[in-house]
Image (cartoon, helix red, strand yellow):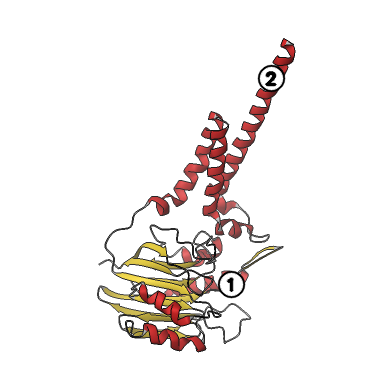
Amino acid sequence: MVAQVARAVQGQLRSVRRWEYGLVVCAVAVAGLLGLHSAVPNRVGRLGSLLETFLPWLGVAVLLLGCLALLKRSVVGLLACLAPTLAWLWLFGGLWFGSSPDSYDLTVVQHNVADDNSDPSGTARALLGARGDLVAVQELTPAARGAYEDVLGGSLPHRAVHGTVALWSAYPLSDVRAVDIRPAGFPDSWQRGLRATVAAPEGEVAVYVVHLPSIRLGATGLASAARDESAALLGARIADDQAERLLVVGDLNGTVQDRGLDPLTSQLSAPASGFAFSWPASLPVARIDHVLGKGVEVTEVSALDSTGSDHLPLVGRVRLGS
């Protein structure tokens, strides 16, 4: 009888050790994905970009592993969870816990309004309610343009429109020009970029309003080649721009962690605080809409309530500096 009990206890101990070993392996794997996500290859199915699109959500895996260790009262498991926890905080702790400065010079509203939006006037009123100095939109159709002009034009009398992107401003605009970011093979009618100089009270700032090509997730992985090519074209334009202060506002169809956007995002600074997931509007899991800066500080970005679009609008606070 004693021998049977002893064998049972030994079996339980072996089971616990195997369980703890599995938890440690999982914790190390999550920490590795967080800390070394750029090492995940992108040649097959753009797996690296796919991981980086949803990288913040690995925090959920960290939380689940920690809860499991607590339930099992495993000290080894809790210690193992420290590695992915620290890795996540290193990457995203500032967005989660950071606070933005109280002072800012510009409020920028960004929204992909959706070309099938059935309530453009209501969407325009929602954007106007954010009290932005600048309102940038994408997927603006000729049929809906009048509704946005009627609602936004009174408070934001200056505007620039090119193709399906537009900018409304409380301050005068100058040097308005088209920005060609078409990937190879795209038709001339694909017009998704403009640049304008905004005469803000604190000084001029160049503003790019852009909409990069969509990406698709299929059986072969992430299809992002056109998006990546467009990002490289835009990155080259930004590199050549002589403006001391510059903003890039728009739907980039990717997160700032996505290496496919590196030719662009490597030159720009992201908001200091706020996750502001913007897509899809029904259950936001990624921020693919952005307010990014060069020579300025985007101190905060936040998401607004849903409109008639499949994206959420964003509000960015910008300090232009001296």
> What is the x, y in percent for residue 215?
61, 69
**Visible residue check, residue 294:** no
> What is the x, y in percent for residue 227?
57, 71
Q: Residue furthest top?
A: 2
Q: Secondary structure at mark 1?
A: loop
Numbered label attached to residue 176: none
The amino acid marked with disc number 1 is Ser
The quarter of the image holding the C terminus is bottom left
Q: Which residue is mark 2?
A: 10
Distance, label 2 to label 1, CA atoms, is: 56 Å
Residue that appears at 56% across and 52% down: 37
Q: Callout 2: 10 Å neighbours few (<14), some, many (20+)?
A: few
Q: Are marks 2 and 1 in contact (CB under 8 Å)?
A: no
- The answer to whether residue 18 is above or below residue 156 is above
Q: Which residue is mark 1?
A: 214
- The answer to whether residue 51 is above or below residue 188 is above
- The answer to whether residue 285 is above or below residue 162 is above
The quarter of the image holding the N terminus is top right
Q: Callout 1: 10 Å neighbours few (<14), some, many (20+)?
A: some
Q: How many marks?
A: 2
Residue 26 appears in which quarter of the rendering? top right
| Closer to the camera in the image, 162 or 315 | 315
> What is the x, y in percent for residue 311?
51, 70
Q: Secondary structure at mark 2?
A: helix
| Closer to the camera in the image, 125 or 50 | 125
Choose mark 2 or mark 1, whichever is in front: 2
Residue 158 appears in which quarter of the rendering? bottom left
The numbered mark, 2 or 1, whose residue comes first in the sequence reads: 2
Residue 284 in the figure: left or right of residue 93 = right
The amino acid marked with disc number 2 is Gln
| Closer to the camera in the image, 124 or 76 | 124
**Visible residue check, residue 50:** yes
